C-alpha cells in the first residue's frame, strides 16, 4: 500500500531522456501504487489542450493506460502548465484538483499544492501569477491562433529566465510564515509540494493552545533534472526518494 507524488518533470521534446524515464517510472514504480499525484509542472510548457505535439498524446496515453490498470492519477496545476484543461484531463483519465487540496491517506491529513503560492517574497512573480490565472485572460489567450500563443509563450519564457537570473535564492524559495499560515489554516500535520526544486523534508514546530509545541512537516519534491524525485506515502511512513534517471 502506497501513494506516490511527483512534480517538476518539465517534460519537453528537448529532453527525450526525461520523457523516457517518466514512461519507465509509470510502469515500474507507479503501476503497483494505490494512486499517483502530480503536483504541477509535468510539462515544461503548455499553451492549450489543442497543441498537436505528439509527446502530449504519448503522455496522455500512458496515464490512461495506468488508469485502466487500476491506478488513478490526480493533478494540481504548476506555474508552467496551468493551462492544462478538461480535454487533456479527459484524454489522460486524470482528475484535476484545486490549487490547494487536502487528502487523507492512511490516517494522515495532508495539504497538497504546487508550491508557487508560498513564494510570496517574489512579488513580481506573484503579480504575474495573479494576471495569468485570471479566467478572462486565460479564455482570451486560448482563443488566439495556436502559432500566436506559441510566440507569446516563448517571449514570456525568455523574460522569466532573464528575471530569475537576477533574483536571489531566498526570494525564490518559500516564505516560512506563508508555510505556517497554510498548515494552521488547514489544520494538517503534513504538507507536500514542489516548485522550488529543493528536495527535503522539513520539521516545523508550531505553538498551539492545547500543548506547548506541535511538530508538523513539509516535504518538498525535487525536479527531474540530474535525478528523479518522488515522495512515497505508506501506512508506515512518508519518504522522499531520489533515484537515477
Image: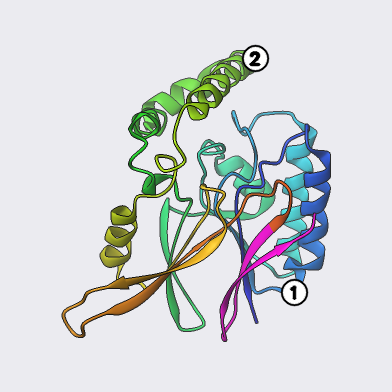
Residue 17: horizontal and vertical position, in percent? 83, 44
Which residue lies under the disc numbered 1? 32
Determine which quarter of the picture holds residue 147.
Answer: top right
Q: Earlier in the sequence, mark 1 or mark 2?
A: 1
Q: With 17 as the anchor, is 6 left or right in this view?
A: left
Question: Which region is colored magenta?
Answer: 229-245
Q: Secondary structure at mark 2?
A: helix
Residue furthest left in the image: 209
Q: Secondary structure at mark 1?
A: helix
Q: Is residue 81 magenta?
A: no
61 is higher (above) or lower (below) than 220? above
Is disc 1 in contact with disc 2, using a CB cutoff of under 8 Å? no
* Quadrant (top left/top right/bottom left/bottom right) for the N terminus: bottom right
Residue 58: horizontal and vertical position, in percent? 79, 44
Determine which quarter of the picture holds residue 101.
Answer: bottom left
**What secondary structure is the stretch in magenta mostly built from?**
strand
Q: In the image, what residue occupies the spot 73% across and 36% down?
A: 12
210 is higher (above) or lower (below) than 136? below
Q: Residues within 10 Å of mark 2 (few under 14, many from 20)?
A: few
Which residue lies under the disc numbered 2? 147
Amino acid at each position: 500500500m502506497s501513494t506516490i507524488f511527483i512534480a517538476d518533470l518539465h517534460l519537453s521534446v528537448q529532453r527525450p531522456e526525461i520523457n523516457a524515464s517518466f514512461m519507465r517510472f509509470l510502469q515500474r514504480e507507479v503501476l503497483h501504487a494505490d494512486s499517483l499525484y502530480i503536483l504541477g509542472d509535468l510539462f515544461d510548457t503548455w499553451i492549450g489542450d489543442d497543441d498537436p505535439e505528439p509527446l502530449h498524446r504519448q503522455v496522455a496515453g500512458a496515464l490512461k493506460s495506468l488508469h485502466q490498470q487500476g491506478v488513478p492519477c490526480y493533478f494540481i496545476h504548476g506555474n508552467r502548465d496551468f493551462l492544462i484543461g478538461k480535454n487533456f484531463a479527459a484524454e489522460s483519465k486524470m482528475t484535476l484538483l484545486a490549487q490547494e487540496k487536502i487528502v487523507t491517506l492512511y490516517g494522515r491529513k495532508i495539504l497538497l499544492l504546487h508550491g508557487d503560492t508560498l513564494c510570496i517574497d517574489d512579488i513580481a512573480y506573484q503579480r504575474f501569477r495573479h494576471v495569468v490565472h485570471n479566467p478572462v485572460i486565460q479564455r482570451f489567450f486560448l482563443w488566439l491562433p495556436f502559432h500566436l500563443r506559441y510566440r507569446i509563450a516563448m517571449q514570456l519564457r525568455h523574460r522569466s529566465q532573464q528575471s530569475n537570473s537576477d533574483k536571489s535564492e531566498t526570494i525564490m524559495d518559500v516564505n516560512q510564515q506563508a508555510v505556517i499560515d497554510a498548515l494552521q489554516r488547514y489544520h494538517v500535520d503534513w504538507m507536500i509540494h514542489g516548485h522550488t526544486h529543493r528536495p527535503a523534508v522539513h520539521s516545523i514546530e508550531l505553538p498551539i493552545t492545547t500543548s506547548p509545541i506541535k511538530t508538523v512537516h513539509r516535504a518538498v519534491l525535487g525536479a527531474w533534472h540530474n535525478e528523479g524525485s518522488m515522495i512515497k506515502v505508506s501506512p508506515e511512513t512518508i519518504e522522499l526518494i531520489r533515484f537515477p534517471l
